[in-house]
Image (cartoon, grey):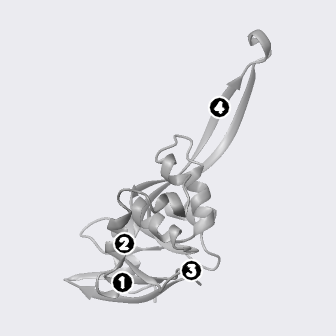
């Protein structure tokens, strides 16, 4: 698998899970999720397949951040904040990059089309599954631009379960930050 949990440790008084994330064109990088004083049982971690993840991001019917979502490694490297991710990932295991935070949604959309002179109105309904970012677009496009095939993200429950079904790496499961605190994921 391209992502592996390598340790749970306490740093600066906080327990965190640290992941190694493989890249196609360089050494692996490190990411983490840390406990907070609240909501740890509602914060899920999902190991996502990069292709499925990107497809869900591009499916956002509200087209939030679509100029970035529809990009490619060449355009992503031109993003004004890309160098911030370069710097962030450069610290390695000593200071792992936090997981991106995403939201997962499903909506039913209605579109209406008309034939000549507004006769023959047709309604089309479609079910759309998509994701959006709360935080972490730049670190995600950095991973994708380096050929990352899978990476962990943070998503609120119960959305994390739906994201897992739609875009997870086979053989993985959702776990919560509370599970990290309790040592239940090793």
Please give the label number shown on residue 110.
Answer: 4
Q: Earlier in the sequence, mark 4 or mark 1?
A: 4
Is disc 2 surrounded by few (<14), some (14 to 19) or many (20+) residues within 10 Å?
some
Q: Where 161 sits versus 61, above or below? A: below
Please give the label number shown on residue 182.
Answer: 1
Secondary structure beneath label 1: loop
**Marks 4 & 1, CB-CB < 8 Å contact:** no
Foreground pick, 148 / 53: 148
**Disc 1 and disc 2: Cα gap in Å?**
32 Å
Is disc 1 surrounded by few (<14), some (14 to 19) or many (20+) residues within 10 Å?
few
Q: Quadrant of residue 34?
A: bottom left
Position in image of residue 127 (x %, y %): 66, 44
Q: Which residue is mark 2?
A: 86
Q: Quadrant of residue 42?
A: bottom left
Is disc 4 surrounded by few (<14), some (14 to 19) or many (20+) residues within 10 Å?
few
Q: Quadrant of the N terminus?
A: bottom right
Q: Earlier in the sequence, mark 3 or mark 2?
A: 3
Secondary structure beneath label 3: loop
């Amino acid at each position: 698998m391209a992502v592996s949990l390598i340790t749970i440790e306490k740093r600066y008084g906080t327990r965190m899970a640290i992941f190694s994330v493989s890249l196609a064109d360089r050494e692996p990088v490190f990411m983490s999720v840390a406990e907070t004083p609240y909501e740890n049982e509602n914060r899920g971690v999902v190991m996502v397949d990069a292709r499925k993840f990107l497809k869900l991001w591009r499916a956002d019917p509200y087209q939030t951040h679509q100029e970035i979502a529809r990009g490619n490694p060449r355009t992503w490297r031109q993003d004004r904040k890309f160098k911030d991710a370069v710097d962030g990932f450069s610290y390695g295991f000593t200071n792992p990059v936090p997981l991106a935070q995403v939201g997962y949604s499903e909506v039913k959309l209605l579109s209406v089309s008309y034939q000549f002179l507004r006769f023959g109105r047709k309604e089309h309904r479609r079910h759309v599954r998509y994701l959006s970012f709360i935080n972490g677009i730049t670190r995600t496009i950095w991973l994708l631009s380096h050929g990352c095939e899978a990476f962990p993200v943070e998503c609120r429950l119960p959305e994390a379960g739906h994201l897992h079904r739609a875009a997870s790496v086979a053989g993985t499961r959702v776990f919560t930050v509370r599970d990290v605190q309790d040592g239940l994921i090793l």
